[in-house]
Amino acid sequence: MEMKIRAAVVRAKTDPFVMEEIDLEEPRDDEVLVRIAGTGLCHTDLAVRDGHTGSPFPIVLGHEGSGIVERVGARVRKVKPGDHVVLSYVACRACAPCKRGEQSICLESFPGNFGGARFDGSLTMKKNGQPVHGSFFGQSSFATYALAYEQNAVPVPDDVPIEILGPLGCGVQTGAGGVINTLRPRPGSSLVVFGTGGVGMSAILAGRVCGCTTIIAVDVKRARLETALALGATHAINPSETDLIDAIKEITRGGVEYAIDTTGNGKIIRQAVDALAVGGKCGLIASSEEEIHIGAGELLPGRSLVGIIEGSAIPDIFIPQMIELYKQGRFPFDRMITFYDLDRINEAVADSESGKTLKPVLKP
Ligand SMILES: [Zn+2]
Ligand SMILES: [Zn+2]
């Protein structure tokens, strides 16, 4: 059994997205069919489009979906038709990190989220009988409907507009979780965030939630820094205009207690370490091949660097927490969003790449 959906397909590496009619399978026992209300565009979608992850083509991307459950498989208990859900990442649930509750560092994370197929290797989509890869982050939600697993469909309250919630499934979770779950800054402490895209802005919002009293935004784009200040940063530094390390040390009177790097740029990370106070902690959120040279003696006085995936979040726990903070007015992540029709996905991509928009959300 199959149903017709409309989806944004990438036919080959670096090709634009093309809207096509695709056949999507009905949900298997552990799957959930979701009518998509909105899907955030994240840099990872573009990295996959450009071939950086080796994912197969043609493929339907989209991994920050939100929507309403249409149908569920026979063994699904967590959600039922009509429920509002946010779709997040998948984990194998069987490896050692998964078993101890650290599913963000699942050993099968890469094939599970980027492999273009279900965990068992089967495909969820076809076009005219020809295979189309999907199951991207267990969803492929640049589409009118998406097939998710029960595990990554997170039930959310229905008194919040469903179309704004998709980015909580990846980008916002990544930035906010990096601060709230991993760095855990003390109230009254200082935090610097390198790079103020959607992930960095989410880290800034989270710094406020945690009670950081000094929150420094770093970016070379002046308009982004203005937005960061409006969202709760207390200071903004443009490293193209001033000496970054000196400026951070001056603001923090000697060194910053917590840092988040969203750039993956080796030179920036090196400067982040230089700006850390003794006992300071720096979280690395962006994947990159860059090497960082750090003397062991620099880290000895309690400094640490830690890699963070998906904000170390368990989506079933963390997404409802972020929504509650949003409802209380303490986490206004929706101010980052610009809506586009899914048909205009290539325009959303261009606006995201140029920095014109912070977090495009595509509505089918
Ligand atoms: Zn696992
Ligand atoms: Zn993402």
Image: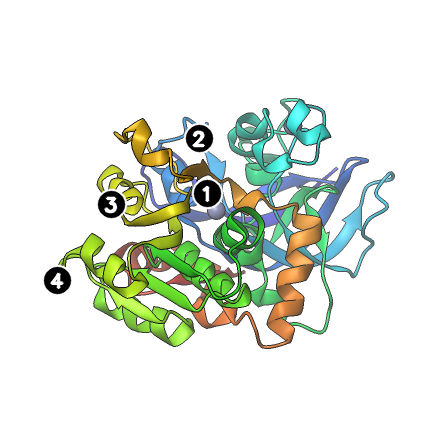
Considering every residue shown, the one lying at the far left of the view is 241
Q: Which mark is residue 271?
A: 3
Q: Nearer the viewer, residue 244 or 16?
A: 244
Q: Residue at x 33, y 63 (%)?
A: 216
Q: Amino acid at mark 4?
A: Glu
**In the rendered structure, which disc, 4 or 1, sits on the residue that comes first in sequence?**
1
Q: Amino acid at mark 2?
A: Phe
Q: Three-letter amino acid code at disc 1?
A: Val
Q: Earlier in the sequence, mark 1 or mark 3?
A: 1
Q: CA distance from mark 1 to mark 2?
A: 9 Å
Q: Are marks 2 and 3 in contact (CB under 8 Å)?
A: no
Horizontal side of 35 relative to 358 (left or right) equals right
Badge 4 marks a residue whose secondary structure is loop
Neighbour tally class for label 2: few under 14, some 14-19, many 20 plus, Cα within 10 Å: some
Whether pointer 1 and pointer 3 mark residues with C-beta atoms closer than 8 Å, the reply is: no
Residue 140 in view: no
Residue designated by label 1: 9
Mark 2 or mark 3, whichever is nearer to me: 3
Whole-percent x, y for residue 38 in the image:
56, 61
Q: Comparing marks 1 and 3, which lies closer to the viewer?
A: 3
Query: Mark 2 — residue?
Result: 57
Question: Could you tell me which residue is drawn at 43 percent across and 50 percent down?
Answer: 42
| Residue 213 position within the rendered picture, expressed as x and y whole percent measured from the top left | 44, 69
Residue 93 in the image: x percent, y percent?
71, 30
**Spatial separation of the CA atoms under disc 1 and disc 3:** 40 Å
Residue 350 versus residue 96 in the image, above or below? below
Instruction: Tell which circle, 2 or 4, labels the residue nearer the N-terminal end.
Output: 2
Determine which residue is flagged by label 4: 241
